Image (cartoon, rainbow, N blue to C red):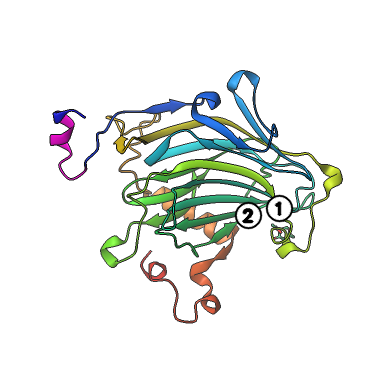
Amino acid sequence: MTTRYTSIFLLVSFSLVAIALAGNFNQDFDITWGNGRGKILNNDQLLTLSLDQNSGSGFQSRNEYLYGKIDMQLKLVPGNSAGTVTAYYLSSQGPTHDEIDFEFLGNISGDPYTLHTNVFTQGKGNREMQFKLWFDPTNDFHTYSILWNPRHVIFMVDNVPLRDYKNLESKGISFPKNQPMRIYSSLWNADDWATRGGLVKTDWSQAPFTASYRNFNANACVWSSGSTNCPAMKTNVAGDNWFNQELDSTSQERMRWVQRNYMIYNYCADAKRFPQGLPPECSLA
Ligand SMILES: *[C@@H]1O[C@H](CO)[C@@H](O)[C@H](O)[C@H]1NC(C)=O
């Protein structure tokens, strides 16, 4: 570490370097399980995961990130996907880990997927919000983004914000900001709970089930050997300053539209589940 970095970052004992990555699956990801069921194809442009009765599969990023705007295009398991779950998330490690989750719960043909989201801080989740989508996520690729900066965790689909978990540390609510996270994804069988609470089982005659990924892009601070490397220019190709980005009034209006029309579960509206009172962020967000 250079003294220049040391003097710039007095409070943090790590250095910062610029990274902006364009999709390159072999360089950025390892297929970690599934015994050949995860594949990188088409000259590195496409990654697929598959699931059959013997196993699912998964991959993870080589890098760990501490803040970033992370985009991935996914095309979900088509047809009768009931019982399958495609998880796509950021997570740190250990018992007090932080985690930012997208999970796609399959359904029988023609019935809508459920997009499940959650935020864990210091090992505690219980912040589920679920949505239906305004398109069929199996017909084509759509962009699923996590914007994670010091003040917000914002979930977006095709640039439309679904939810905004704000940094309310000043009110005593924890926020993910110290633990670097990797990107993980997996396709697995969860027919004990996923579809209509486990009533609909996976139809193995349809196997293998396949989900596809392309156009990964991370404008992110990369963690390496105890240091974090942030882009000097914290803007993405569109010129958005992701590190300081917040939802402007148009985006807030769009988020309200999604939540009014497509949200099917909100932990902040589930008073029965929290008899001692809703989590504190619910009245502050
Ligand atoms: C599947 O479709 C049914 C009927 O529309 C719906 O109630 C359910 O929430 C959908 N999603 C899952 C994951 O079961």
Q: The C terminus lies in which quarter of the figure?
A: bottom left
Q: Depth check: 202 or 233 in front?
A: 202
Q: Quadrant of residue 74?
A: top right
Spot occupied by residue 84 in the image (x, y as percentages of width and height):
71, 50
Q: Quadrant of residue 164?
A: bottom left
- Label 1 to label 2: alpha-carbon separation: 7 Å
Q: Amino acid at mark 2?
A: Lys
Residue 63 inside the magenta-drawn segment: no
Residue 86, image x, y percentages:
64, 46
Beta carbon of the mark 2 residue lies under 8 A of ligand 1: yes
Q: Residue at x 75, y 48 (%)?
A: 81
Mark 2 surroundings within 10 Å by alpha-carbon count, few (fewer than 14), some (14 through 19), many (20 or more): some
Task: Tell me if residue 126 comes above or below residue 68 in the rendering.
Answer: below
Mark 1–mark 2 CB contact (< 8 Å): yes
Specify which label sits upstream in the sequence, 1 or 2.
1
User: Compared to 107, does 225 lie above or below?
Assistant: above
State the mark number for residue 112: 1
Residue for point 51% across, 71% down? 269
Residue nearest the viewer, comparing 282 with 67: 67
Q: Is mark 1 within 8 Å of ligand 1?
A: yes
The mark found on residue 132 in the picture is 2
> Which region shows up in magenta?
4-12
Residue type at mark 1: give it. Pro
Residue 22's place in the image compared with 221, above or below, is above
Circle 1 SS class: loop
Q: Is residue 151 left or right of residue 257?
A: left
- Mark 1 is surrounded, within 10 Å at the Cα level, by few (under 14), some (14 to 19) or many (20 or more) other residues, namely some
Q: Residue at x 36, y 48 (%)?
A: 179
Q: Considering only vertical position in the picture, is 252 above or below 206? A: below
